[in-house]
Amino acid sequence: MNQNPIDRTRFEAIEAYVLGSMPMDERSAFESEMTKDSALRAEVELQRENTLAVELGAMERTLKAMRAEHAGLAEPGSAGWTNYLKYAAAIAIVLSAALWMLTRPSANERLFAEHYTADPGLPVPMSATGDPAFQDAMVAFKLGDLAEARGKWSTLLQAEPTNDTLRYYIASAALAMDDAAAAIPLFASVAADPTSGFRTKAQWYLFLAYVNAGDIAKAKGMPFDDDPTYGERVREIKAELR
Amino acid sequence: MSDDEVEGFTYTPADHELCTLQPIPRIIVLRFSPPVEVRATDITTWPAWAMGLHRNDPASLRALYKQHFPAVKHSVLQNGGTDNDAQDMFQEAITVLWLKVKEGQFIPESDPGGFLFRVAKYKWLDVVRSAAHKHMKVVHDDRTSEVRADVPDDIEDRIVRLRGVYEKLDDKCRTVLDRFYYERKDLATIATEMGVEKESIRTIKYRCMMKLRAFRRTIAGEDNLGEL
């Protein structure tokens, strides 16, 4: 078997064969090729095994989820324990309410939460040869692994400190992690760059980052009210800031 | 003592009746046709429970659980186990059944209730005989070899090996691969559910499977791949 990764077209052909979704005419040709190519046969076998491993893992996860549905009823003599749980639950509710009163978000934090939607990220192209490190981080970002994405992009930024795409997405990951302090200087640098394609979005997120950080003066001072995309929301938020 | 009995651990006809699987009132739309090898055996002639397992239909799993777990639970509780033990044994038995169905090793006409009961029983007897339970009274069972025939060592080894592969996947890979290969959703559906582009899901799937491929190549080596 080839030590290198197989390309996606080849992988998907093998996958289609293993899953039985390959059209009949293609399958005949594929099977004919397999008879002559031991490496292909090995790839097919490996793909079959890996698919089965995924299915088994997922099936067992499903089983675990079903377990609760069939959990045993309370054993005799457990009434005292049940009562104890009721009291504990009541105490927990009271404590939670008290904690919420102490830690409830400020009006500006609520305003931020109302208007903030994380950047959806860039499409991830198939080719792993273009910029695989950046794309790996983008995949992590899209799947919510923000710390991983931020770390990988930060490493890349050291080699390309002026790259506005990296600065914008590192800031986006930081803001999504509620780290407005780290996001603000990065968004600010992109927002100030008239050549950047991310400039307008960076201005919007910079504005929201100021709101999140409670820096009302800077948020209100941003000349962004007339932006055709974000202006209306900016004016609305500014009116509520205090 | 009949063939289906071990003292204190009996599979009765009543258990069997409890275990009868009812038709599943659910229409399942397949995205994939069955794998080539299985197609030859024409799974459309299989009973509903076997087709459901083969297609990873959660309703079939749930139905098996509902129909057959009570008998296993009763027996495990009767033999010093807990509800948790019963769940563990039953889930192990379901896994063996699932793999046998997937690989076409299970006779479709066979009764899943009897099979699940026997496998769970054998597994619980193994636990009971283990060092952790050495102080418990163990009932002699001269039918162990027959029970074990349902679960040959190679299928248990295979399950362990497959679990080891799955454990190599990180959460994001599992999320995508589970939905594609197990739940059999198409890329567009997965993309919509996850709020990303279809092309991204396609890429993630490819890269995750390449990670598994690299892992399998590492543990198997070039020469003994056929043993996997």
Image: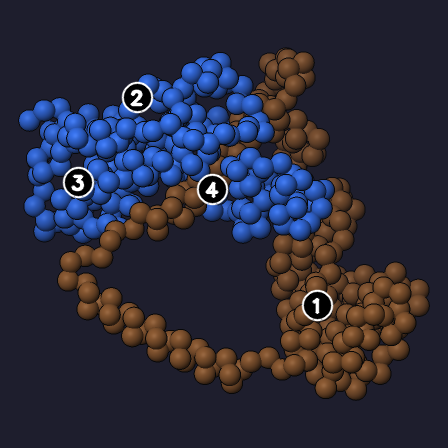
For disc 4, the marked residue is: A58
- A173 sits left or right of A202 in the view: left
- B186 sits left or right of A126 in the view: left
Instruction: Using the rendered image of the protein, determine whether residue B183 is visible from the camera's viewpoint.
Output: yes
Location of residue A94 by image quarter: bottom left
Mark 3 falls on what kind of element? Answer: helix
Q: Nearer the viewer, mark 3 or mark 4?
A: 3
Chain displayed in brown:
A
- A118 sits left or right of B69 in the view: right
| Residue A15 placement (x, y as % from top left) | 61, 29
Chain containing the residue with disc 4: A
Chain containing the residue with disc 3: B
The one nearer the camera, A187 or B73, is B73
The one nearer the camera, A222 or A162, is A222
Of the two numbered discs 2 and 3 on the same chain, state the one appearing first in sequence: 3
For disc 2, the marked residue is: B110
For disc 1, the marked residue is: A116
Location of residue B177 by image quarter: top right
- Mark 2 to mark 3 CA distance (whole Å): 21 Å
Chain displayed in blue:
B
For disc 3, the marked residue is: B75
Q: Is residue B116 above or below residue A195?
A: above
| Residue A69 placement (x, y as % from top left) | 35, 48
- Mark 2 to mark 1 CA distance (whole Å): 57 Å
